[in-house]
Image (tube, rainbow, N blue to C red):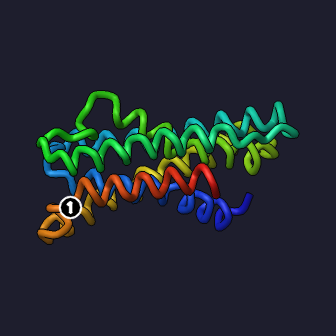
Amino acid sequence: MSFYSLFIVAIALSLDAFSISICTGLNSKLKRNEKLRFPVSFGFFQFFLSLAGAYSGFLINTYVLSIPKVLGGIIIGIVGILMLREGIKNTGECVLVKKGMELVLGISVSIDAFVIGFTLLNKISSNILLFKDTLFIGLVTFLMSVFALYISNFLRKIDIFTKYADYLGGFILVIFGVKMIFF
């Protein structure tokens, strides 16, 4: 795969992590080190699941199922609904602060990386080249997520974003969940 094609795939895979990182960055209840766990999780799981998908695709190239996308969409949708519910209740609790949420979201947004690895990266003949390409995908996702956190610092200064951050984050997650399930 050419560098240009790999870069486009990496950007496309990182867009959902980018959006979720903006939502986490807007959340004032999360501390900086808690926010940084999300990009690390997103980058790692994009790398790991694209690598696992490539090896799985190499072994089973003829059976591409949509179950992983549907499962990831359901998980992201549930987290979005929980965020919307917390915004409506306005109890001051934050779903994203709960322990392990960065892992749940990291795996959920990386299911598509597994499918990409399964379908596109399974024809790579060198393990070193495969490792380098999947590491590049994880690095791009990490950098895009950190950039989203940086952007959210500026968006947080706008009152409407901070006032409705739970609604915005929940709505975006529900939309991504629906997109993963049906599209």
Mark yes or no: residue 87 visible. Answer: yes
Q: Mark 1 points at which residue?
A: 164
Q: Percent from the top left, x then y, of residue 108?
A: 50, 41
Name the image quarter holding the N terminus: bottom right
Furthest residue toward front = 89
Q: Which residue is drawn at 24% across and 53% down?
A: 166
Question: Viewed as shown, does residue 172 lie left or right of 1?
Answer: left
Q: Nearer the viewer, residue 83 or 12?
A: 83
Residue at x-position 43% and y-position 53%: 174
Amino acid beneath label 1: Tyr
67 vs 28: above or below: above
Query: In this view of the protein, which residue sits in the foreground, 119 or 89?
Result: 89
Q: Which residue is drawn at 24% across and 62% down?
A: 152
| Number of numbered tags placed on the structure image | 1
Query: Which quadrant would the C terminus be assigned to in this image?
Result: bottom right
Q: How crowded is mark 1: few (under 14 residues within 10 Å), some or many (20 or more)?
A: some
Q: Of helix, strand and loop, which one carries label 1? A: loop
| Res. 46 in view | no
Q: In which quarter of the image is residue 105?
A: top left
Whether 8 is drawn above or below 129: the answer is below
What's the residue at 53%, 62% (across, down)? Answer: 11
Q: Outermost residue, top direction?
A: 99
Q: Residue 95 at x, y = what percent?
A: 26, 39
Residue 33: percent from left, percent from top: 21, 40
Q: Quadrant of residue 98?
A: top left
| Extreme residue in the right direction | 62
Q: Is residue 152 left or right of residue 175?
A: left
Q: Where residue 20 sits in the image (x, y, percent)?
A: 37, 53
Q: Is residue 160 above or below residue 88?
A: below
